[in-house]
Each structure stands twice: as structure tokens, then as C-alpha cells.
Amino acid sequence: MSFFPVSNPDELLELVNEVGFLPFFKNEIEGFSLEEHTAPGFWFNDDVEGPWEWKATLSKSQKCAYGKYFDKKAGYVSLKWYPHLANYRRCGYDFDAKYDDGLVSMDEKQVMDTLLEYGPLLSFDLKKLSHCQKSFDSIMTKLQMQTYVTSANFEYRVDKHGNQYGWGVGRYAISEQWLGEETCIGQYDLDPKESFEMIIDHLIELMPYADEKKLRRFMR
């Protein structure tokens, strides 16, 4: 199949649901990104809402997942496929069990505990409250890659005229609390390797031209 071009959040959600996985930016898999399927006029155009604004719309809709899921870079995952991604990336571990087995750091635990206590937080508030100043960005990337944390919104500063400006500030949440428990643990009965093979088979069916080795490396 060929990915259809998108021009608004509804079309983007339709595409995410159809393909299951959609990285935000171009990558080593040709054609496998939102960037390649959005007209140039929607990027960096103050007069038109585009991909930067759409990610806020879809994140807060809770109809798909947005976060750093692809080689430590951002993109979308449908609610249908998120359980398989979570099963594979977590190796069947809930976060607390992983911590008990010594497989996550104290800094990661502090971030998760802070989100449990306060609920979804803007990144600068989460950074301050979790006391993870130096390693915060890498911790957030790791927790998103492992599917324990997801984006809940992107919020903009507003000037005295009510106009938004600057880059959207991410608000983050524990994935189970934002996307629902079943969306996160719904495939825990499968071997994580089986979930991964299902993901790869699905993507190869969508993109038979893709180099399988590159695809496997990109999705790990």
C-alpha cells in the first residue's frame, strides 16, 4: 500500500490507524514518516496549522499514542498496535517489577513516582519535582521508548492578545493512566518476541520495498 497524504488531524489519525506506526521525521526507511506524507506548506507556516500543532491535538485526544518510540525519536502508534509495542519493549515487565529486579535506575523511578503522585505534568514541572536535572532528557526518552510514559499534550505560551507563540511544551503521563491499562498490557500473554515479529511482519506487508534488517534495527 502507499501512505496517503495528510492535511489535518483527522486525516493524520486515519493514517495512523491504518498503518499502525508512523515516525514523525524522515528516517532510514524511505516513505516511513509523517514528514514525507505532509505537503511542505503545512510546515513552519504561521498561517496554517500543521504537524507541530496536530501532535497536540492527537496526544490529548487519547485516540492514539505520541512519543519517542522510534530509535529515540518521536512518532505515532495506533491503539491497536501499542499493546504489542509495549509487550515487546517492556519484555512483559510492569515498571515496579522491573525496578524490583534492578533493571531501571533510581532517577527513572523518581520520574515515575512523580507522575504517579501528581498526574500528567509539563516537562519543566516534572523535571523540577523529580529532582532529575542533569539526566532528565535521556530519562524521558528511555521511559517513552519503553512505553512507560507517553505524551498527553503540547501546550503553548500565550501573549497579551491571546495568541500562542513559541514551541509547544510537552505534558507527560504514565501510559496506563493516559491510554488505558488494556492498551498497555493487553498483549502480555504473548511472548515479547512474538509481538515484535508481528510488528515486523505487519510493516513488511505495508512496505515490501523496505530493507528488513534496517526495519528491525529501527523498531527495536
Image (cartoon, helix red, strand yellow):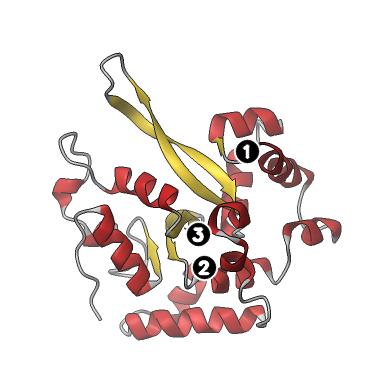
Cα–Cα span, label 1 and label 2: 24 Å
Query: Considering only order in the chain, which callout, 1 or 3, is on the residue closer to the N terminus?
Result: 3
Query: Considering only order in the chain, which callout, 2 or 3, is on the residue closer to the N terminus?
Result: 3
Q: Amino acid at mark 2?
A: Tyr
- Residue at 33 percent of width and 85 percent of height: 208
Quadrant of the frame with the C terminus: bottom right
Give me the disc on residue 82.
Answer: 2
Question: Up-down: is 137 above or below 131?
Answer: below
Query: Considering only order in the chain, which callout, 2 or 1, is on the residue closer to the N terminus?
Result: 2
Mark 1 sits on what residue?
136
Could you say which is closer to the camera, residue 139 or residue 81?
A: 81
The image position of residue 146, as x and y in percent, is 62, 60
Question: In the rendered image, is residue 33 in sight?
Answer: no
Mark 3 sits on what residue?
69
Q: Is residue 119 left or right of residue 63?
A: right
Q: Is mark 3 in CB contact (under 8 Å) with mark 2? A: no
Question: In the rendered image, is residue 134 in sight?
Answer: yes
- Secondary element type, mark 3: strand
The image position of residue 45, as x and y in percent, is 18, 38
